[in-house]
Image (cartoon, grey):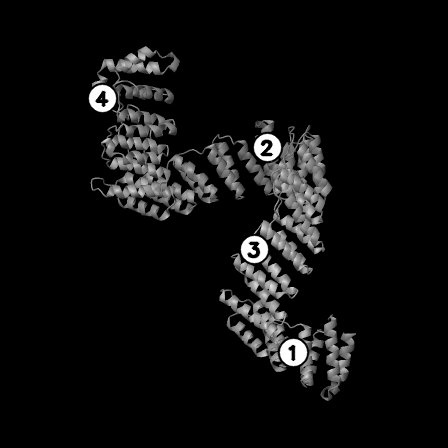
Amino acid sequence: MALRAAVKPPHSPLKPFSLNTLSISSSIASSVTGDRLAHKLFDLFSQPASLRNPDELQNLGRSLRPETVEAVLKDLKEWKAAHDFFRWASWQDGFRHNCYTYNAMASILSWAQQRSRLRPLVKELVAQRCPVSPGALGFLIRCLGNQRLTDEANFVFEHAGDLNCVPNSYTYNCLLEAFAKDGKVELMESRFREMVGDSRREPDKYTLTSMLQCYCNSEKLDKVLDVFNRISDRGWADEHVFTILIVSFCKWGKIDRACELVERMEKMGMKISEKTFSVLIPGFIRHRRVDKSLVMFGKMKIYGFRGTLSLFSVLIEGLCEEKELRTAMDLYLEMKKDDISPDVRVIKNLISAFCSEGDLTTANWFLEEEGEKLDLGSLVLLYNAMLNGVVKHGDVERALCLLRAMMDSSQERVYEGDEDNLVRIKRAVKPNDDSFSTVICGLCKTEKLDKALVLLNDMIKMGCKGKLLMYNDLINALSNMDRLIESYELLKTMKEFGFVPTEFTYNSIFYCLCKRGDLTAAIELLKEVRSQGHVPWIKYCTIMAQGLCKNGKIKEASCFLDDMIQVGFLPDMIPYSVVIDGMCKTGDVDEALELFRRISSNYYVLDVVAHNILINGFCKVGRLQEAQGILKEMLEKGLVPSVVTYNLMIDGWCKNGMIDEAVTCFSTMVGDQKQPSIVSYTSLIDGFFNAGRAEDAIDIWNQMREKGCAPNRISYTCLIHGLCKCGKVDSATFYLQQMKNCGHEPDTFIYLLLIDSLALKGNAVKALELLKEVIKNGGLLNNGPKSLRLMRKIALRLYGNASTSLDVKFFDEGRNKHLN
């Protein structure tokens, strides 16, 4: 029989050849000899290769024609047999495959998903320059497209001229469909432009549908809407087009848009298929739109489609997650009414959800309703769901009580609770590893470690091992409470049960050791961590370095990092920076620089923070040139100094009386497009005052305000202090009032400094008035030696001034009350 590929719409599903898809050649159908030959070859190739008679095959091969090969391929159901026959036919003298035999083989291989054999078949067809009709070429391209072989589909299309074929609209539609399935947007657009460039090939509904599918698969929303509008304007929008768009919107989480399209379909008299409903409802649930999924479920029932177990299950699970428990119960009852038996997953979700809300009565009702029908393994799953729900509700003690009842359920037990929350264990149900893990993890979270350890021992006595997560939670909780010995014992236990400690396990214990500052034990643990292929967490290494440095053990901190390298771990820059900072704070800047150099040479290009730490260290000890050298190194390494970097240098120059260098550094910072901070301005103001350049200090203050940098308490204090030192008492008084108006309360020392300046300038009345205000507000309480010395100095000045003699008694009382 001769079979031919029929032309189909490009969105229809590809099926194996049949009499409906292939036309019968009348000349071959009437040939008895051809029919007998086909039957004979079918019988031979339906047998194993070892049973085929070579001589008989050779004889039959002399009469072989393409129509016969096509008929045999159609009847052979097994792809390997069909492929053997196709290859055998290729080797027969005088025989040559035509486009229909190639297509028959391609259809079989595509249906069997044999991509590795489809590829050489296409290359062979092109190499043989086999003449192909536009319809046959389109059919071959669809076979390739169904297996996402878009490169091969494009390849055979490009060689259409070698195959004596001029592609028509159908051929292009098949190619565009293949590109759409594989999301090849650029190829699709290129071929579409090529297609519309010839007036003989008019794009039709199937063309635009393929483009719509391709843009949907690539999530190109603007182009999706453009193509859909073009389809709608031509009146081509059907159920298939709408479904493509609705399902895509659902996938993208645009649930409201998908629902709008559903309503539009309904207004146009179109119906959604049951398959589409089965995609939309779970999709809406995934995007937490339970409300819309229920609307779709209602429409599905109106259309006469019956809910399935999988749909009920996903709806109930979504409702439980959203705590819509009444609606979940209604769906459960509807299932029962429709004679759909809920599976363990449905009941498990319901029990866990009701327990999570503290409704044990309803949860127990589900147990009694469904528990009798289940085997013991499934029943344990439901009790575990109850344990999990109770723990989630925060009632770990009740969960523990229920677990104890499960452990001793040889007779009917009542789970301890109030009269509205009784759980009856009517069948012996032995808890498993999940049961114990759930409760033990809950006890760990509520820091009831002693009870958790007792339960762990009881679990082991029952022959259970628990879960890895349970051991990790226990070890972490014990380590956080500095119960190190028990952590190690538990680590040993979990290993004995065959659990492999994770990175979290080891780092929990490592954290405890780092908090303790136990160098020896930490390094020993790291050796084991290394052998297991895990790494220590940076934050814990940093805690160790910080703790040691804080206690003055800088060398030990440095040795710890060296030991880490010996073990096989390269510490992060952060703990190294901590150690360098510790050395700088103790004045060991040379040692800090040596460590800095060693790290830079062997391990890291240290970051800006590490450079800042070293710059700060050198500035603190007055070695400004070396600090400047570090800044220069930063620039040579390509690091960009931060505002903090410049501030450190500016402050260092100022504190060492080198105001001109500080101004130069400030200018460099501005030139590097760095916005000076309040710290930058305050350091310069202080430096100018220390250098006796009050006018320059005021200019910087005004510049700071003009740049929109609002003064803070420290900057006001610096300004007032400097003005007092320079004898500008009136200005200092003005800025003191401005400081208070801005909501920054001056400290007592600034008040006293201004009072002393006023007294020194001869304004003893104003000084005494301000002092009274300070005493009245309790500003003389709890002050340091520096303030006390200044107050005594003020007292002497005021006693010696005649204008304040009448107030000596008042001042004496205040002084005796607050200075003694």
Q: Residues within 10 Å of mark 4 (few under 14, many from 20)?
A: few
* Residue at which label 2 appears: 381
- Specify which label sits upstream in the sequence, 2 or 3: 2
Q: Is residue 271 visible?
A: no
Please state which of the two labelled residues, at mark 2 or mark 3, is closer to the viewer.
3
* Residue at which label 4 appears: 25
Are the residues flagged by discs 4 and 3 in contact, CB closer than 8 Å? no
* Residue at which label 3 appears: 607
Q: Quadrant of residue 584?
A: bottom right
Q: Quadrant of residue 364?
A: top right
Dot 3 amino acid type: Asp
Disc 2 to disc 1, C-alpha distance: 80 Å
- Specify which label sits upstream in the sequence, 2 or 4: 4
Q: Nearer the viewer, residue 623 or 157?
A: 623
Q: Which residue lies at the image location 59% right of the left edge and 65% below the top edge?
A: 649
Q: Residues within 10 Å of mark 3 (few under 14, many from 20)?
A: some
Quadrant including the C terminus: bottom right
